[in-house]
Image (cartoon, rainbow, N blue to C red):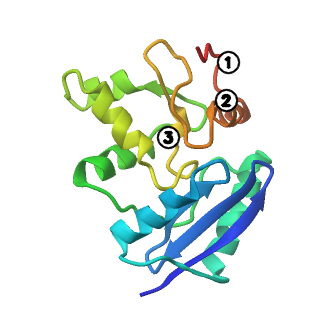
């Protein structure tokens, strides 16, 4: 089974990207704990990806840089989402949030009929293995505050500013 990774460079900094035969399966920010990378692959694949070149990672790097330069608003790189049924349902819903738009964890819980489910939604959003492509940065706290993002709150704000989402946000 194909499982390849390599570091990619963007204006956000270096990211570690991994692809399976189905698509991009993991994207890790440089500020994240590298141990999470190994644990995630052990859980979902039973092995760590090999470092190397792959055309899908090249395409991801190109599309990320185009997105960060405001040349594209959506990605066409296929993703291989690995998680529980609940998580993949939430991640699939995140793909429907338009560029420049935001929703709250509570909005998603209400929409999906999960009474008091903001925490469950937050857990699923926080487990997103391919941030940016699955736009978890577009999910905000109850009053529109910036909360929870693997790349850090500053990066979340940068991504929302890039997309022209309404700012400034109160991140406290």
Q: How crowded is mark 2: few (under 14 residues within 10 Å), some or many (20 or more)?
A: many
Which x, y percent locates residue 124? Answer: 35, 42
Which x, y percent locates residue 93? Answer: 37, 43
Q: Looking at the picture, tell me which residue is in the foreground, 98 or 104.
A: 104
Q: How far apart are marks 1 and 3 (CA)?
A: 17 Å
Q: Residue at x 73, y 35 (%)?
A: 162
Q: Which residue is drawn at 60% across and 51% down?
A: 74
Numbered disc 3: secondary structure: helix
Name the mark nearer the viewer: 1 or 2. Answer: 2
Quadrant position of the N terminus in the picture? bottom left
Q: Distance between the residues labelled 2 and 3?
A: 12 Å
From the viewer's perspective, is 62 left or right of 170?
right
Numbered disc 2: secondary structure: helix
Q: Name the residue under label 1.
A: 167
Instruction: Tell which circle, 1 or 2, labels the residue nearer the N-terminal end.
Output: 2
Q: Residue at x 53, y 33 (%)?
A: 138
Residue 124 in sight in this render: yes
Numbered disc 1: secondary structure: loop
Q: Name the residue under label 2.
A: 157
**Residue 65 is drawn in which quadrant?**
bottom right
Which x, y percent locates residue 116? Answer: 23, 21
Q: Residue 136 carries which label?
A: 3
Which x, y percent locates residue 78? Answer: 50, 67
Q: Which residue is drawn at 70% across and 73% down?
A: 58
Compared with residue 159, is residue 92 higher up or lower down, i.e. above or below? below
From the viewer's perspective, is 12 left or right of 37?
right
Asked if marks 1 and 2 touch (Cβ < 8 Å), the reply is yes
Q: Looking at the picture, tell me which residue is in the foreground, 156 or 112.
A: 156
């Amino acid at each position: 089974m194909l499982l390849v990774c390599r570091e990619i460079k963007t204006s956000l900094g270096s990211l570690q990207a991994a692809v399976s035969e189905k698509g991009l399966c993991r994207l890790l920010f440089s500020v994240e704990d590298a141990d999470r990378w190994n644990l995630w692959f052990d859980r979902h694949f039973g092995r760590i990806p090999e470092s190397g070149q792959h055309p899908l990672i090249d395409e991801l790097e190109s599309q990320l840089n185009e997105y960060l330069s405001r040349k594209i608003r959506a990605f066409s790189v296929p993703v291989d989402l690995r998680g529980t049924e609940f998580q993949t349902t939430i991640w699939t819903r995140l793909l429907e949030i338009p560029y420049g738009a935001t929703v709250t964890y509570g909005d998603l819980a209400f929409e999906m009929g999960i009474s008091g489910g903001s925490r469950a939604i937050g857990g699923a959003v926080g487990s997103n293995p391919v941030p940016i492509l699955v736009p978890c940065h577009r999910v905000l706290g109850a009053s529109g505050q910036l909360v929870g993002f693997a790349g850090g709150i500053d990066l979340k704000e940068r991504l929302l500013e890039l997309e022209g989402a309404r700012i400034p946000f109160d991140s406290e």
